Image: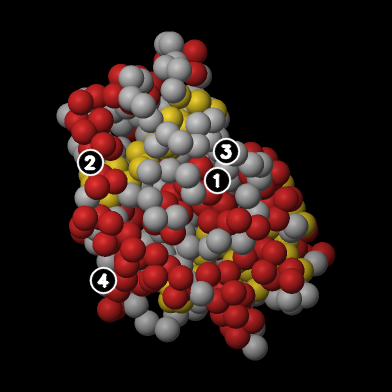
Amino acid sequence: MHVAIVVQPAHGHVNPMLPLVPELLSRGHRVTYATGPECVPAVTAAGAKVITIPARVPPMYWPEGANDERVDGMLSALSTGVGESLPILLREFTQDPPDVLCYDLTTEVGRILAKILDVPSAALVPHFAFNEDLGMRDAIAIEEDWSSQDPGWPWHRYLAAMEEIAARYGVTWKDDALDGTAPADLNLVLIPKDFQYKAETFDERFQFIGPLDNSRVQIGQWAPRNPAAELLFISFGTLFNNNPQFYRTCFEAFGDLDWEVAMAAHKLDVAELGPIPSNFEVRPHFPQLDVLRNASAVVSHTGIKTLMDATTCGVPMVIVPPVPMCKLIARRAEAVGLARCLDPVTLDAETLRNAVEQIPHDEEIRLGVKRYQQLIADCGGAKAGADALEAYRG
């Protein structure tokens, strides 16, 4: 079986799905994986054949506030990437058609490509799933403080552009994946079903295979400088980390603690942050599982992969959610006892420090994390995902 996977070049979308690659390869299947240049090294390391497409994920978080111009720029970049990527993908897959095409739920080029090729397709869902009873499109890309004379107009331009791109290839496109009105025939959802909002409304089209074990595809190794010290991991992901003040607040909160701090800054210019405390190690990124296996607590924006990895490793989380989709995840994480949430608007060093010092000793959180460790273990992971794809293709 030839499995094609198309995922937007965001580490929070690519990395959660990578363990499917070695699992499929170990069963004798071929895997071709298309994504943008930033994520190619990780995909190559997983063993897939790589197609590099000119897609990029533009900034989706503006600490100074969202407005029409910024949202329009973001959506224009997304639609431009679709238009530029389709000819490349069609050239490759017309010559070597896949037996099944898997696309990340937010990767519109994958949905359009499946229609053009007219091949069986499956959605890969790294976060909450959406169906006819639960749609969250409006919560994903629009900031709560976005004020506009006509809040819909950037979306109108985006929708028109996407419809025009699809029409060039004789197919139709509708903005219906994230509002739940057109689920794929097979949806592989990378969270436990217990974590899903309105879980009881999801039928057999949705396989909740849980988070996938990344240990086979992790790049690099890491060990704490002082194994005897408590370790704090700070990670604000790759899309929402352009907020230097947040990192300065972390320096103020934890700079004089006995804890060791590993802080992932991704593309942030560290020089903007000022002097780095001696107990901090700041890198663009860390081998996340190596850090989490040693950590006592995590501070995060609530990337769902980080949340699931931390839970798997038994580590509680303090969440500072910057955007609506993160707040949806954070609210659920707090409700099931995996984390404590802080308001990013009123956040200060003292509040953040107190939360981190208290959470390792929070009995409710300890029990919640333990319960979810078992739920995750029972999901099946990459093996369940490969089983589902094989059954889907008969």
Question: Dot 4: few (<14), some (14–19), or many (≥20) neighbours within 10 Å?
Answer: some
- Label annotation for residue 42: none
The residue under label 2 is: 358
Query: Label 4, label 2: how many angstroms apart (C-alpha)?
Result: 31 Å
The residue under label 4 is: 198
**Res 313 → quadrant:** bottom left
Question: Dot 2: few (<14), some (14–19), or many (≥20) neighbours within 10 Å?
Answer: few
Mark 3 near mark 1, Cβ–Cβ under 8 Å? yes
**Res 41 → quadrant:** top right
Q: Is residue 112 left or right of residue 106?
A: right
Where residue 292 appears, x then y in whole percent? 47, 46
Which residue is more in the foreground, 237 or 73? 237
Query: Label 2, label 1: how many angstroms apart (C-alpha)?
Result: 23 Å
> What amino acid is found at the position of numbered circle 2 in the picture?
Gln
Going from the N terminus, do you reach mark 3 or mark 1 first?
3
Q: Residue at x 45, y 17 (%)?
A: 278
Secondary structure beneath disc 1?
helix
Going from the N terminus, do you reach mark 2 or mark 1 first?
1
The residue under label 1 is: 290
